[in-house]
Image (tube, grey):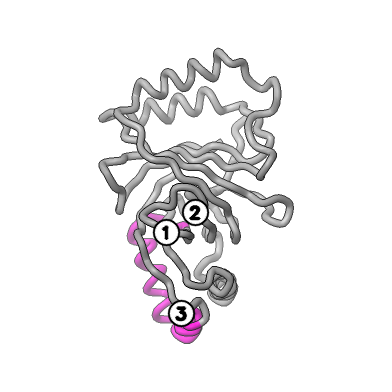
């Protein structure tokens, strides 16, 4: 039975109070017209997968993608408690899957990893597109407090959306130390959300920018979740 997971990077449902969650991502360039086959492979291999914690996600890279990359893989787990449950799969099955998957990949890109420091679960079916900002806040503690506060104050806007904040700890992309993600329906949905915040939460947003402190915007991009287990 398929597990419905929500994320970064992607859309994973979990309790941050239980264990510190971590992630690892790898950008890839898929062969032309191979997306449907990649999703089918994921569905066949991971449909009944049992993970100790977290899971794995296949995402399509959309606006803001770099270096010709088309997709990315995201692994999520509780620190010191990752991977598949013992006996859940045989080694030859794992090797066969990744062999078939790799045959549909034109090239592999860079990997990066970090932790998830703040999270609000959302409905990934209603809001399947994630807008991710790579940033470097001067004061990460102040940023997290401001982030959590505006999510609470504008709860009507963020209702049912995935909203998260976390760190890049390994291979920071373009030097970024942190990231923020917000779920949306599509590009129009994200733009409408920004308009809503500007029109109806002006005072709260102004205070948010003051409270979060100085922030360097490094890069931003859109992902679309294709398969999640």
Q: Callout 2: few (<14), some (14-19), or many (20+) C-alpha neighbours within 10 Å?
A: many
Dot label at residue 79: none
Dot label at residue 168: 2
Magenta span covers which residues? 183-210
Q: Horizontal and vertical percent for residue 91?
A: 58, 16
- The single residue placed furthest to the bottom in the displayed view is 203
Q: Quadrant of residue 16?
A: bottom right
Q: Is residue 197 magenta?
A: yes
Secondary structure beneath disc 1?
loop
Q: Is residue 34 magenta?
A: no
Q: Horizontal and vertical percent for residue 1?
A: 63, 29
Identity of the residue drawn at 59% across and 73% down: 145
Residue assigned mark 3? 209
- The single residue placed furthest to the top in the displayed view is 92
Residue assigned mark 1? 176
The CA span between labels 2 and 1 is 7 Å
The answer to whether mark 2 and mark 1 are in CB contact below 8 A is yes
Q: Quadrant of residue 83?
A: top right
Say if 117 sits above or below 27 in the image: below
Identity of the residue drawn at 52% across and 72% down: 139
Give whichever of 169, 184 is nearer the camera: 169
Q: Callout 1: few (<14), some (14-19), or many (20+) C-alpha neighbours within 10 Å?
A: many
Q: How many marks?
A: 3
């Amino acid at each position: 039975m398929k597990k419905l997971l929500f994320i970064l990077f992607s859309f994973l449902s979990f309790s941050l109070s239980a264990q510190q969650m971590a992630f690892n991502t790898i950008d890839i360039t898929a062969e032309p017209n191979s997306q449907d086959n990649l999703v089918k492979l994921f569905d066949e291999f991971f449909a009944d997968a049992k993970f100790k914690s977290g899971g794995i996600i296949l995402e399509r890279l959309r606006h803001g993608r770099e270096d010709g990359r088309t997709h990315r893989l995201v692994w999520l787990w509780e620190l010191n408690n990752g991977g598949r449950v013992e006996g859940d799969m045989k080694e030859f099955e794992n090797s066969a899957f990744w062999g078939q998957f790799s045959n549909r990949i034109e090239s592999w890109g860079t990997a990066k990893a970090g932790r998830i420091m703040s999270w609000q679960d959302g409905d990934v079916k209603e809001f399947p597109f994630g807008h991710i900002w790579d940033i470097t806040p001067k004061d990460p503690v102040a940023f997290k407090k401001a982030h959590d506060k505006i999510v609470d104050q504008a709860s009507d806007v963020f209702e049912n959306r995935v909203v998260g904040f976390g760190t890049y700890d390994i291979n920071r992309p373009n030097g970024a130390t942190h990231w923020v993600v917000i779920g949306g329906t599509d590009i129009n949905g994200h733009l409408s959300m920004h308009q809503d915040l500007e029109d109806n939460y002006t005072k709260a947003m102004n205070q948010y920018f003051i409270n979060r402190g100085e922030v360097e915007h490094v890069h931003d991009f859109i992902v679309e979740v294709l398969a999640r287990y």
